[in-house]
Amino acid sequence: MIMHGQLTTKLLLASNMSKIVNTSIQQALSPKGTFDREMMLKAGGVLPVPKGATIAIQNNVTPSEKADSKVVDAPAYLTSSERLKAIHDAVEVRRLPVPASPPVERGGIIDALHHQVAEVIREVGGD
């Protein structure tokens, strides 16, 4: 429902844009049309459009804070095979055991269907 309202608004605005601009120009030409003149000059690029709000974040770090922080040694470089083995070992540990399944008994429904299909084929004359 909200999207329908937004699309309707955009459609109405687009279809009446020329009328809106013409009315705004007529109003800007009148003696009391200072606001319309300003908006038309901004739209035409003659007057600058003010920027939106900007946020300046200052990160002031004193030298004593830098000295207190400890540098962590980076791990030694591993070859591709060593990395692959490390990944494999990490994943292998997390595998879940396979759940025990009950044994399949012979002579169930599937086996009976096989014999029934064979009989139907013989009756039809396929063999």
Image (cartoon, rainbow, N blue to C red):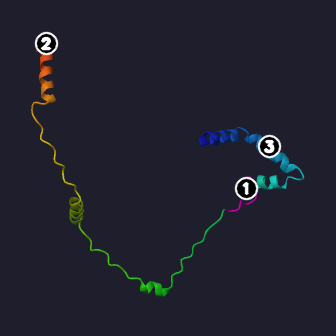
Q: Quadrant of residue 126?
A: top left
Q: Residue at x 32, y 75 (%)?
A: 74
Question: Which residues are drawn in magenta?
Answer: 42-51
Amino acid on which the number 3 mark rests in the picture: Asn
Question: Mark 1: which amino acid?
Answer: Gly
Which element is circle 3 on? Answer: helix
Q: Nearer the viewer, residue 17 or 88?
A: 88
Q: Residues within 10 Å of mark 3 (few under 14, many from 20)?
A: few
Give the alpha-carbon distance from disc 2 to disc 3, as whole Å.
Answer: 87 Å
The residue carrying mark 3 is 22
Q: Residue at x 16, y 44 (%)?
A: 101
Quadrant housing the N terminus = top right
Up the image or down, 56 lies above or below 89; here it is below
Query: Tag 3 or tag 1, which sits nearer the N-term?
Result: 3
Question: How far is the residue under mark 1 from the one under mark 2?
Answer: 89 Å
Q: Position of residue 10 (x, y in %)?
A: 66, 42
Question: Residue 33 — which label?
Answer: none
Secondary structure category for the residue under label 1: loop
Q: Quadrant of residue 38?
A: bottom right
Mark 1 or 2: in front is 2
> Which amino acid lies under the numbered mark 2 shown in the image of this protein?
Glu
Query: Magenta span has 43?
Result: yes
Q: Is residue 35 left or right of residue 92?
A: right
Q: Could you tell which of marks 2 and 3 lies nearer the N-terminus?
A: 3
Left or right: residue 50 versus residue 37 is left
Mark 1 lies on residue: 45
What residue did someone put label 2 on? 123
